[in-house]
Image (spheres, helix red, strand yellow):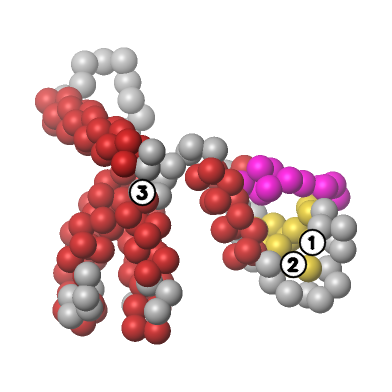
Amino acid sequence: MSASQKPLLIKRYASRRLYNTESSDYVTLEDIAGFIRAGREVQIIDLKSGDDLTRQYLLQIIAEHESRGENVLPLDVLTDLVRSYTAQAQSVVPEFLSMSFDMLRQGPNKIAEQMTAINPMMAQMSKMPGFEAMQRQQQQFMESIMSGWPTPGAEPASSEAESPAAEENAEDLSEIRKQLAALESKLSKLGR
């Protein structure tokens, strides 16, 4: 495995400071978020106990971004995640979320293909109470998050005139963003 494929090892000292073993300096949560955005995998371990703290710190990074108003996770998705911490849903929700993000990484063209592959799992999940609402929320979540992800194999934008299909996609994206903004506005009014 090459150095770029190995997870970046971050050690947490007793003082709770985080130490980047590659660059031999201390880092912040924002630095770690930057490494991840740049495509690096990270592993954060406690120096004394050897415990893997990666999940804990990734959740903290997400919580900090959400608390600053950088909302990626709609309130109803967060609520459903909290609800998923039951014995009944705990077994299928992580797999469902993992598959959803795998599809996002592979691009929108693979989503339809993979949905047919997971039909047996979907049939089992559809028997769960509240599954239809969770499915709608997952679709909304995927649409909102996909707007910022590049499509694999897509040509970079050029200054020449765009094709009609590209213009239609841009209009669809614009409409989705307007709808998302309207939903966020309604949610913020309800939260007052």
Q: Residues within 10 Å of mark 3 (few under 14, many from 20)?
A: some
Q: Callout 3, which amino acid?
A: Pro
Examine the rendered structure and indicate whether residue 126 appears above or below residue 23. below
Give me the residue at 37% from left, 51% from top.
75
Q: Callout 1, which amino acid?
A: Lys
Give me the residue at 36% from left, 48% from top.
74
Q: Could you say which is closer to the camera, residue 93 or residue 25?
A: 93
Camera-nearest label, 1 or 3: 3
Camera-nearest label, 3 or 2: 3
Q: Which residue is mark 1?
A: 11
Q: Magenta span has 30? A: yes
Q: Position of residue 88 (x, y in %)?
A: 34, 83
Q: Position of residue 64 (x, y in %)?
A: 58, 46
Quote the CA–CA distance across marks 1 and 2: 5 Å
Give me the residue at 87% from left, 63% from top.
14
Examine the rendered structure and indicate whether residue 186 appears above or below residue 129. above
Mark 3 secondary-structure assignment: loop
User: In the picture provided, is 18 more to the left or to the right than 34?
Assistant: right
Q: Which residue is mark 2?
A: 45
Q: Which residue is mark 3?
A: 74
Q: Position of residue 77 (x, y in %)?
A: 35, 56
Label 1 with label 2: CB-CB less than 8 Å: yes
Examine the rendered structure and indicate whether residue 84 appears above or below residue 21. below
